[in-house]
Structure formats: structure tokens, C-alpha cells
Amino acid sequence: MVSVSHPNCLRLLGVCLSGTRRCLVSEYIANGSLDCYLRRHKVNTKSAAFIEPICLCSDLATRNVLVKRQDLVQITDFGLAKMLSGDEEHVPIRWLAVETLTSGRYSFKTDVWAYGVTLWELFTFGERPYANIDTADVKRYVLEGGRLMQPDICTLDAYQLLLLSCWRENPEARSSFIELLHLLQSRVGNPEFFLHDRVSHLLCARCIL
């Protein structure tokens, strides 16, 4: 991971293995994680931050996306924290795909699922996924076909083409990152695709001000 170099990936500088605590060492990002940034600033953008995967993340969520600048975010962790600690109890079950919940498998397609949940976090300003469901019941809910609800500000088109397409039970039926990237790029100048008219108009007014 130290050799990974990409503008949207936080550079891992090293690992501290001394003592009882094991730590990852990376550059300092003053704005902190995206989930906290969203809650502080109630930020909406005309398009979602996106990178084509260059390696398997396995723990994609807004808490693991750091805001370096308003126009630049970086992915961190890549599941390394859990690997170093050996802690199997603190599994991010609310971001896990069906096949991970049933067999523990991770792939780019499970990252696509987690990316959909991360987009849902963006649309809800960092709300907790399945907030009204106990952690112990999330697995059963997802395996029975339950999915996160359409966010209030999200259009039906964006919900179906961006979010639900990431959460299909069959991994091969899910959108690929390339397909998602093409969709986002094709709609980048059209905020009405992502957000209800009243919200997108408010954002445009705020941009003018």
C-alpha cells in the first residue's frame, strides 16, 4: 500500500507496530473525514466525488474518505486498520454486500455495493445507514431484499441508476465503476438529475451568492 500513488488515495507513510497499539501513519488532512465534513457544512455538490478503483478498498464509507480540499477527497484505510488490529467484531456490516454477509467474500463488486452506500451517505448529509434497524438485524434485512430508502433530496432516476444499481443481489448484475463513472460524467452539468428541482435551484443560488 505504501507504493500506491493516486490523487484520490491517501498516501500510507508507514505502520507503527511498537507496544500494544498498532497504528497507520499517513499525511495529516485538516478537514477530516467526509462524514464529519458533511454534518458540519451540510455540503451538496452537483456531482459525486469519484475515482476509478486502482485497488480493492473493502471498507469504503464516508468515514474513510478524507477532505483534503473542497474539490479533492482521498480514500484511506483500505481495510488495513481491521487487519492490523485483528478485530473481527467491528465489521462495517451496514456497508457490506450480500455475498460478504453470507460468505465473507470481497471483490470490486462488493466495493461497488459500499460505494452505493457511500453515495447514500452523501445524499443524506452523513446519516447512518439503516439507522432505524438494530445492527444485529441488518444482515437479515439485507439478505431478505431490504435496501436503503430513497433520500429526500435524491431524484428517483438517481436513486435507481446510481444507488439501487449498486445493490443488486447478483454481483455481476451490479453497475461497474466504469459504468458509474460514465453516468456521473454525462450528468455532471445537470444537477436536476441528482437532486429535486427545489434543491438544485437553491444550490445554484448559493453558488451565485
Image (cartoon, grey):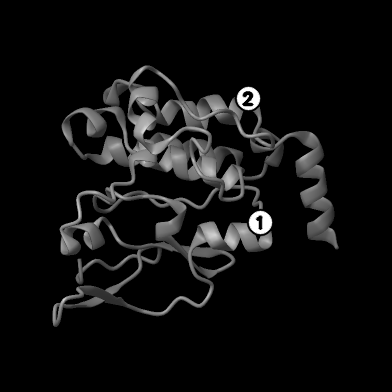
Q: Distance between the residues labelled 1 and 2?
A: 20 Å
**Residue 77 drawn at (x, y percent):** 30, 61
Q: At x 32% / y 42%, what residue is drawn?
A: 111
Label 2 sits on what residue type? Leu
Give the quarter of the figure containing the C terminus: bottom right
Q: At x 47% / y 26%, what residue is drawn?
A: 164
In this rendering, the answer to whether 23 lies above or below 153 is: below
Mark 1 or 2, nearer chain start? 1
Label 1 sits on what residue type? Val
Q: Name the residue under label 1.
A: 43
Local packing at callout 1 (Cα closer than 10 Å; few below 14, some 14-19, many 20+) is some
**Residue 41 drawn at (x, y percent):** 67, 62
**Residue 86 drawn at (x, y percent):** 15, 58
On screen, residue 41 versus residue 52, left or right, reads: right
The answer to whether residue 166 is visible is yes
Give the quarter of the figure containing the N terminus: bottom left
In this rendering, the answer to whether 117 lies above or below 142 is: below
On screen, residue 30 versus residue 113, left or right, reads: right
Q: Mark 2 points at which residue?
A: 156
For residue 115, what is the image quadrant? top left
In this rendering, the answer to whether 37 lies above or below 193 is: below
For residue 153, what is the image quadrant? top right
| Residue toward you, 1 or 86 | 86
On screen, residue 62 versus residue 38, left or right, reads: left
SS at mark 2 in the image: helix
The answer to whether residue 177 is visible is no
